[in-house]
Amino acid sequence: MSHPNSPHVTSKYLSNFQGKTVRVIGKVGQKQGTSVLLFTTDNGQIWVDRSNNLQKDYTSPIVEILGTYQNNSLMEIEFLDLSENFDFELYNQMVDLSYQLKDIFF
Amino acid sequence: MTNNSNENVIVRTITPLTIRQIQLSTESEGNTFKIDNEFVMNVSLVGTVIKVLDGNTYTNYTIDDGTGQLKIREFKRHKQNNMEEEEEQQQQQQQQQQQPQEEGGEGENKSKAKEIENAFENKYVRIIGNLKEYKNQKSFSVSKITEITDSNQITTHFLEATLVHLQRIKGTLKKEQTSSQNSQIKEEKNEIKKETNNNNNNNNNNNNIITQQNTNQILGLALKDKALRLISSNQTSSGISLQELAKELKSTEEEIREIVDFFLDQGQIYITIDDEHFRSTD
């Protein structure tokens, strides 16, 4: 399961990653067919297309999605369940910080 | 941490890093890498396991932490497996026809190992390991790999890596505070020098006395600075005593008492076990 670099992003940075692989953490929302709505830590929303990974179900309400961003949705490659006490605000600030401090993240 | 020969660098800290930092590190002396101008040996990483390759004596993991991917190696140290492996090695050395038994033994090893590898695959893990240079290549050997159950550790690891990185390239906050104290003391010194000059110009007769007084004031400032530094550098819970300060600074207890009272009033130090022991509030 080799894939290129996948930085942690929140919804506001997604437009910079058109066609690229990213990691997005969020709260699982409603389902619509093979897609799931993900609420990101910066109060954004992104549709996650699960067609390539339907055999596994999310078991936690908070997940990290590894996927390719294109056409306003995230094509899921893989997901990871995260613990329910995950601090959204802290993670959000960390992602913002990683963009300010790029040199150890990018 | 001087480096006289290739293998004598010893670093006792564990540095939290991102894989990007490891990939970008090129500086090394002997076998030890330098990141942000400091030697690093023991390193902590947080990432997901995306690939596992199981061998007889080691397991190779590929870790992805969002900043890059790294291949790391964990040498197997299971006690049960060690005994079986020793037996296997003996059998291999003695005879060539032990294959059925060896396969059985290996099969057991493999299934146990497989259980472990599946436990980590596609999970977030924390890794403590050793970063070394081996034949011009980076090699990372794992001391400990554990699954992360509280996902906040992902966030805190990146924050720690950021903090340590910034501290190493820009200096700690403490240094900034000390340097602002230094500049405060320097300003005071400058003011006194100006006073000395004025006095010298106006009162030639009293020059010597005044200069002496002013010099004492300036020396007194240097003493205060040294005293604060000594107190700050003392990390014991009971702090440094008045007597020790007087001894280190080659001064009288009365003088030290004055200095210490000044800092107590300012809130820069506090008393610990009795009013002759002090610690810095930094």
Image (cartoon, coloured by chain):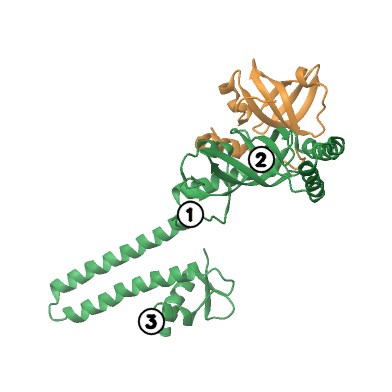
Crowdedness of circle 3 by 10 Å Cα count: few (<14), some, many (20+)?
few
Q: Earlier in the sequence, mark 1 or mark 2?
A: 2
> Could you tell me the amino acid type at mark 3?
Ser
Residue at 79% in and 17% down = A34
Q: Earlier in the sequence, mark 2 or mark 3?
A: 2
SS at circle 3:
loop
State whether residue B8 is above or below residue B24. Answer: below
Residue at 22% in and 66% down = B194
State whether residue B247 is above or below residue B138. Answer: below
Question: Which residue was labeled with disc 3?
Answer: B251
> Could you tell me the amino acid type at mark 2?
Arg
**Which of A96/B52 is in front?**
B52
**Disc 3 versus disc 1: distance between alpha carbons?**
30 Å
Indicate the chain coloured orange by its letter: A
SS at circle 2:
strand
Q: Is residue B261 left or right of residue A9?
A: left
State whether residue B74 is above or below residue A48. Answer: below
Indicate the chain coloured green by its letter: B
Question: Which residue was labeled with disc 1?
Answer: B173
Residue B267 makes an appearance in the image? no
Residue A53 makes an appearance in the image? yes
